[in-house]
């Protein structure tokens, strides 16, 4: 004979009232009850969570290595994170309260920072003193300057290392507290993802799939491990597991796969990577290491600067030179500097080589960089605000403390103007010991040298060989493209990218300039690559009789230079359809009235040009138009749809997680689990912003929901009676035979409470449910909101 157990049937009404009155005291005293507090985590699970926190924190920092070069700071960061988390784990082993654990971790963090950076002012080299703390603002200020004005990838000095190590140690403490003390792994996940995005916002680049997958795996591990520790006690006392963590982990894994698949289709961020990392400005900057792909593919084109000149042709403006090539990347030059107030060296050329002086006026509109765009070769720069220095070897202008943004200045250049006969007679040699401008990395693909020798076969002078290379690159065999390199996976300037570029013969300025420079070195000629801007387009305005030109962010450019004895560094233009190819006029051509050379019949390049040029954009060539003076802006219409779908999926994840949890609890309630039904009612209240404090009994909460939030009386009464039976009646954990009533009651209560809430609370409850990160009875669950009106 079947018998349905509901409560103690022989209990009198007075006994029930006594039992109900004793509820608050009993609820507070039942330490093992899931309604009172979360059970203590087992030692093995706690160790796993601690290790998971450390691994996930370090995974979130992996993208930082693309902005800051690995160095001793990375080892220091690893040490500080490991020791801080180990201290927290040991403190928990001795049953220390959460506040004490955090204090122990903070003490270890402070001692380690003192040992690493403040030994000279610390007591016994370990205990910080007032002098130690006074040095912190100076270190932080210097670190901010390094970030704002440094070149990516930065070589971290002591101030920047202090900022990195201290910040990561503090982050490890916070994540450890949120995951192991506050039991809110989802909040920790959001924080870690935000931290991992910072390097990408500072220097946009291709997605680092490895770092993303490691971080996602770490976050899913934390969510799963922490949830299982809270499910363990419940699984021991009930026959039907909730399975929430498994569902959440599955959804998270699907989200990772979708993100990895969809991210390559997303549009490039508008933020500009650059010489200055741009933490202090949202405007344009420049990546001098030849990683220009993201800059050129930005969806929005913006004005960078304006210029005017007394030269016949608007000059290219250089920002930095790049000479050292490791085989994987090009490294910007960092030679000795002298104050710009000192006179720059005069341009030294061979006898009878003509030098002409020109002045170019520049106004920076939106460019935040430690480097200053200048014409070449500069002998004087005036009108700048702040302290600036010059690299004498390449005549670039830099500053450690000031930015190029909003600067207005004049650049005086002395331009060598050899005749065609003079440059053909000159050797492309430095005349000194080999240096980084002549070095060729190991394991250069054979195609590079083979093509260099094949294209230049039959030439008799260095200049003719370089013009042959220039003509070959600018001829019909190559195609200019911003997209093909990315699709083929060689969006860079290393040896592998160069090999692929020469095979498919499609790329943009970086590929052409880097390949030209390496081929010149293979032919025993010193070469380097210059990063800067094309001359721009005419605005139609005129100042002092000089046309004003506007230079856009899409006109960022890279071009090669080769050194000739007695002449200096000579630029070449290898990118098809961009700029003007380098040509020189023979001595027989008469000078124009303004002193510039004019050649009505150019013969040194297959690409037609209205008149010859000495160097790209220098006197003797025509002004550039918008079609030839822009690297281009490519906008793919497909990424918008992919981005929208990906964002929608990410925004839907909280709602999907909450729905999975609700369905699991309803299923458990239908099987008779009163605890699952009551917890669903509590979480519904939390989602709507209704406080669920630990001090409130189920009857008090139920009465408040009925009177203030339109919950149906009968449904709430069913749930209150069921949770009371589950808590006190023998064998009452499962209400056999009453499962359907429990499920119907919680569904009815939820529907009525959602219908009674205002539109904003209802939308937030569905789209961003608070119950995913806040537990009923926690300190975060007690905030009050006004009850809706009963009308």
Image (tube, helix red, strand yellow):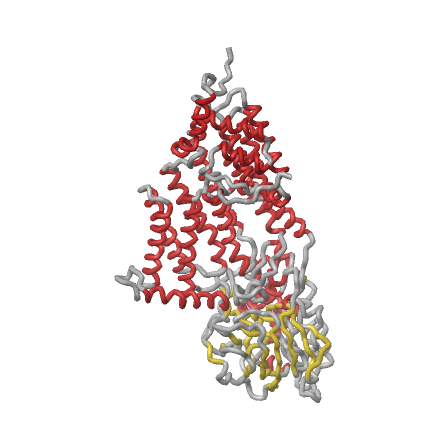
Question: Taking 35 as reference, is 359 left or right?
Answer: right
Q: Position of residue 724 (x, y in %)?
A: 47, 27
Considering depth in this image, is 550 or 536 the residue closer to the camera? 550
Vertical position of residue 99 compared to residue 578: above or below: above
Residue 464 seen in the current view: yes
Question: Taking 636 as reference, is 656 left or right?
Answer: left
Q: Quadrant of the C terminus?
A: top right
Q: Position of residue 181 (x, y in %)?
A: 41, 44
For the point 33% across and 50% down, the residue is 104
Which image quarter: residue 462?
bottom right
Considering depth in this image, is 164 or 740 the residue closer to the camera? 740
For the point 35% across and 63% down, the residue is 117
Quick one: which residue is furthest to the left in this view?
124
Vertical position of residue 249 compared to residue 240: above or below: below
Residue 246 seen in the current view: no
Q: Position of residue 61 (x, y in %)?
A: 46, 54
């Amino acid at each position: 004979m079947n018998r349905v157990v509901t409560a103690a049937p022989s209990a009198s009404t007075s006994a029930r009232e006594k039992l109900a009155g004793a509820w608050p005291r009993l609820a507070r005293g039942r330490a093992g009850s899931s309604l009172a507090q979360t059970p203590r985590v087992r030692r093995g699970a706690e160790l796993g969570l601690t290790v998971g926190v450390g691994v996930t924190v370090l995974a979130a920092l992996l993208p930082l290595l693309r902005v800051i070069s690995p160095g001793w700071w990375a080892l220091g960061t690893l040490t500080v994170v490991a020791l801080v988390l180990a201290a927290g784990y040991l403190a928990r082993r001795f049953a220390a309260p959460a506040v004490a654990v955090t204090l122990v971790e903070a003490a270890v963090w402070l001692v380690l920072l003192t040992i690493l950076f403040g030994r000279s002012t610390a007591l016994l080299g370990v205990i910080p003193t007032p002098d130690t703390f006074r040095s912190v603002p100076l270190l932080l200020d210097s670190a901010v300057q390094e970030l704002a004005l440094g070149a990516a990838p930065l070589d971290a000095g002591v101030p920047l290392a202090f900022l990195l190590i201290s910040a990561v140690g503090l982050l490890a403490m916070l994540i450890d507290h949120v995951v192991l003390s506050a039991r809110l792994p989802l909040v920790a996940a959001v924080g870690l993802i935000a931290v991992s995005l910072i390097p990408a916002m500072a220097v946009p680049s291709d997605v680092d799939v490895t770092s993303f997958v490691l971080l996602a795996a770490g976050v899913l591990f934390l969510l799963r491990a922490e949830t299982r520790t809270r499910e363990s006690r419940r699984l021991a006392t009930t026959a039907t597991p909730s399975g929430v963590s498994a569902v959440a982990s599955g959804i998270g894994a699907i989200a990772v796969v979708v993100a990895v698949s969809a991210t390559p289709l997303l549009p490039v961020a508008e933020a500009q990577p650059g010489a200055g990392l741009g933490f202090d400005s949202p405007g344009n900057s420049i990546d001098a290491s030849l990683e220009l792909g993201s800059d050129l593919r930005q969806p929005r084109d913006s004005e960078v600067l304006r210029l005017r000149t007394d030269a016949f042709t608007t000059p290219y403006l250089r920002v930095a030179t790049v000479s050292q090539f490791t085989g994987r990347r090009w490294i910007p030059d960092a030679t000795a500097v002298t104050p710009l107030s000192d006179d720059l060296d005069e341009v030294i050329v061979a006898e009878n080589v003509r030098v002409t002086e020109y002045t170019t006026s520049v106004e920076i509109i939106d460019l935040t960089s430690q480097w200053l765009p200048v014409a070449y070769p500069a002998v004087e720069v005036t009108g700048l605000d702040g302290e600036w220095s010059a690299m004498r070897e390449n005549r670039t202008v830099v500053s450690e403390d000031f930015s190029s943004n909003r600067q207005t200045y004049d650049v005086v250049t002395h331009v060598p103007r050899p005749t065609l006969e003079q440059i053909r007679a000159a050797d492309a040699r430095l005349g000194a010991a080999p240096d980084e401008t002549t070095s060729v990395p190991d394991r250069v693909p054979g195609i590079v040298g083979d093509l260099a020798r094949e294209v230049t076969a039959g030439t008799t002078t260095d200049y003719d060989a370089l013009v042959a290379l220039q003509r070959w690159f600018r001829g019909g065999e190559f195609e200019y493209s911003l997209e093909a390199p990315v699709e083929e996976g060689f969006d860079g300037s290393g040896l592998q990218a160069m090999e692929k570029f020469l095979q498919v013969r499609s790329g943009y300025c970086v590929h052409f300039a880097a390949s030209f420079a390496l081929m010149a070195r293979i032919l025993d000629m010193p070469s380097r690559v210059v990063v800067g801007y094309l001359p721009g387009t005419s605005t139609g305005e005129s100042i002092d009789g000089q046309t004003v030109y506007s230079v856009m962010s899409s006109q960022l450019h890279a071009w090669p230079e080769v050194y000739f004895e007695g002449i200096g560094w000579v630029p070449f233009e290898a990118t098809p359809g961009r700029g003007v190819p380098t040509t020189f006029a023979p001595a027989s051509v008469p000078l124009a009235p303004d002193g510039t050379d004019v050649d009505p019949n150019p013969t040194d390049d297959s690409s037609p040009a209205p008149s010859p040029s000495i160097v790209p954009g220098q006197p003797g060539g025509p002004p550039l138009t918008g079609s030839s003076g822009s690297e281009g802006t490519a906008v793919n219409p497909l990424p918008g749809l992919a981005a929208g779908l990906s964002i929608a999926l990410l925004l839907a994840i909280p709602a999907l997680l909450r729905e999975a949890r609700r369905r699991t609890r309803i299923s458990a309630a239908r099987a008779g689990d009163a605890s699952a039904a009551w917890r669903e009612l509590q979480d519904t209240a939390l989602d709507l912003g209704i406080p669920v404090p630990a001090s409130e009994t189920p009857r008090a909460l139920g009465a408040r929901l009925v009177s203030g939030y339109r919950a149906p009386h009968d449904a709430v009464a069913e749930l209150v009676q069921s949770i009371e039976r589950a808590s006190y009646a023998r064998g009452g954990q499962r209400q056999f035979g009453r499962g359907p009533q429990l499920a119907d009651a919680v569904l009815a209560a939820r529907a009525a409470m959602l219908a009674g809430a205002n539109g904003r609370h209802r939308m937030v409850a569905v789209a961003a449910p608070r119950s995913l990160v806040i537990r009923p009875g926690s300190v975060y669950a007690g905030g009050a909101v006004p009850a809706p009106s009963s009308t």
